[in-house]
Image: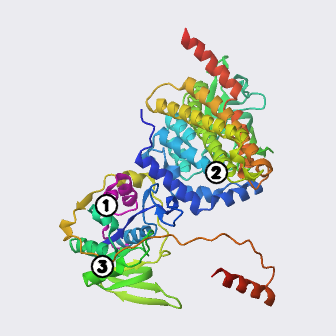
Amino acid sequence: MDFGKTEEQELLLESLKTVYERGDFDTYFKECDQNHEYPQKAVDSLVEAGFSALGIPEEFGGTPTDIMTQIMVAEEAHALGYPSLCWINFSTEVDDILAFGNEAQQKEILKYALQGIKPFTLGFTEPQAGSDSAAMATTATKREGKVYVNGNKTFNTSADRAPYMLCVCRSGINENPYKDFSMYLFPMDRPGITIEKLDKIGNNMCGTYEVHLDNVECDESDLVGVEGRGFYQLMKNFEVERLTICAANVGMARCAYDEAVKYAGQREQFGKTIGSFQLIQEKIVDMKIKIENMQNMLYKAAWKKMNGESISIDSSLVKRYTGQAAFQVIDDAMQIMGGIGYTHDCRISRLWRDQRVYRIMAGTEEIMVHTAGRALIKEAQ
Amino acid sequence: MDTVACYKVVPDEQDIVVNFDNTLNMDRAKSVIGEYDLMAIEEVVSIADATGGRAVLLTAGDERVTDSKLVKAALSRGAAELYAVVDPALASADAFQTAAVLAAALRKMKFDVALFGEGSSDLYAQQVGSLVGFLLGAPVLNAVSRIEVSDGKIAIERTLEREVEVLEAVSPVVLSTTADINVPRIPQLKDILAAGKKPMTVWSLDEVGGLPASSVETVSVLAPASIERKMVVYEDASAESIRALASDIRALR
């Protein structure tokens, strides 16, 4: 078993670090967070250094990259302090469109991904349909050779910037909702689309929106994949999405850990460093154990995915675990930092706000119990 | 124009530990390409690209220079191939010895412009580039902050203390750059992957005529002694404060 990185992976991570240092990103992200601004300057530097090309096939102008390396890069970026939800490797979107999109859709979506622009916002969650995806009520109705989409989607990340929406709709062809969903890809500037910004507690650099779809006219060719197969297509999408989300979790935890441990070795109270107190040491040791566990689970899942094994259970386990463990590590890091950790001067406070949503989005940690629990029992029979 | 950049493999300064007796402990220092040499590499690649020539790299040192990760790190920056003179004795070679070896290696290569960084990021003697030019009998300039090649002519700017000197040179020419001549590229994954496939030629010392005797004896290499911060704040620029500052400085000597 080889736990080492390849020389190529090491050099790529060094390039990432150079981009980060040259851009003085720490200061920049602090400003963007305060001003609720998308970190475009950082995105531009990363795109220039080729990071948005990772994982995109050569024929579309990208650099073929295995999922393991993509995860490593995403983790490292977050460990350096890159803001979550702003990462520019759209492996989920790329994977999705390559698996189910037609040639024209692939060309269009990958063109944006290559430029570091989130190509589409996923129209999945609705006000009344979160974990219960079967309750989705957005419809795609065919009329005179056209398709009309009606409904409301919510928690749409980057709906203000993404040029497209990949929208999951009821097709009205099957009573079983799971066999009735279809995906449509349409530009966000189509008539009938309005967006409304949500005011949330963290991830200030990336806007999240409610999207209203009022008779949005699509062509039948805007269908992605097979009519009525949208739900199954989505489930495949979620496997990759969960791995990239977990990479962000591990990275954010490492970022908080690095800062807190350094501080523990320098901050003096009662005439000695706080790191010499065993209550602080216990926190540090447990934080480190969690980081190691998270990495091991994540990399094993990525390795299985690379080797063509199913990760349907693994992706749920790793999503649940890294969401919780990263939250605990960041929270402990804030505790070690004391009052300073609660101020906006210290980036741990941002991580504390930003990471919290990872226990909710892309499948809550409770839904992960539901998906993995059933499968584990079935597996044992 | 065919170009060659020379670089040195040095210990990463971030990992160098100063011992209590001010000697340097490099045991934990990873080997990296000299920071200023990256500008030389970038410059030869851009000259070669602009003139339809070929850029290659040259280094000399002990077996560390052929470490495959370091070779990939060097070749991921656009040059076509690497030449390396490898011998354990080169790890402790002085500036003249290194220059003699590099000059002998350059004689075996065809080039119009040979470029060096501002100085090595370990010893920073800033001598090797000039010595190589002298040994080759080629025009040699240091502190070069701009190189423009057109119609076979090499226009050079040197940033001096009070002026910018503009010169024109004929090839072959040996130049040492300033650290601000360019911002070295950040290698992309495709460059890193391609670097692994580029050729490397290793020469022994014998193949470049051996190592001349050193005329320098290194007695010791020590970090400057550090002193504790005095934590004194001079509130204003009054004559009294300035007198106090001056007298405090005098007291430290």
Find residue B106 and report its horizontal and vertical position in percent: 25, 73
Q: Of the residues tagged 3 and 2, which is closer to the observer? A: 3
User: Residue shown at 48%/39% (left/top)?
Assistant: A68
Q: Which residue is mark 3?
A: B215
User: Residue shown at 78%/79% (left/top)?
Assistant: B234
A67 lies left or right of A149: left
| Between A175 and B120, the one nearer to me in the picture | B120
Coloration mode: rainbow
A185 lies left or right of B190: right
Is residue A263 among the parts visible in the rendering?
yes
Image mark 2: chain: A
Magenta-tinted stretch: B50-79
Image mark 1: chain: B
Q: Amino acid at mark 2?
A: Gly
- Is B72 colored magenta in this rendering? yes
Q: Are marks 2 and 1 on the same chain?
A: no
Q: Which residue is mark 1?
A: B62
For the C terminus of chain A, give its image quadrant: top right
User: Residue shown at 58%/49% (left/top)?
Assistant: A77
| Between A132 and A145, the one nearer to me in the picture | A132
> How many C-alpha atoms fall within 10 Å of the one at disc 2: few (<14), some, or many (≥20)?
many
Find residue B70 and report its horizontal and vertical position in percent: 38, 56
Relative to A266, does residue A367 appear above or below in the rendering? above
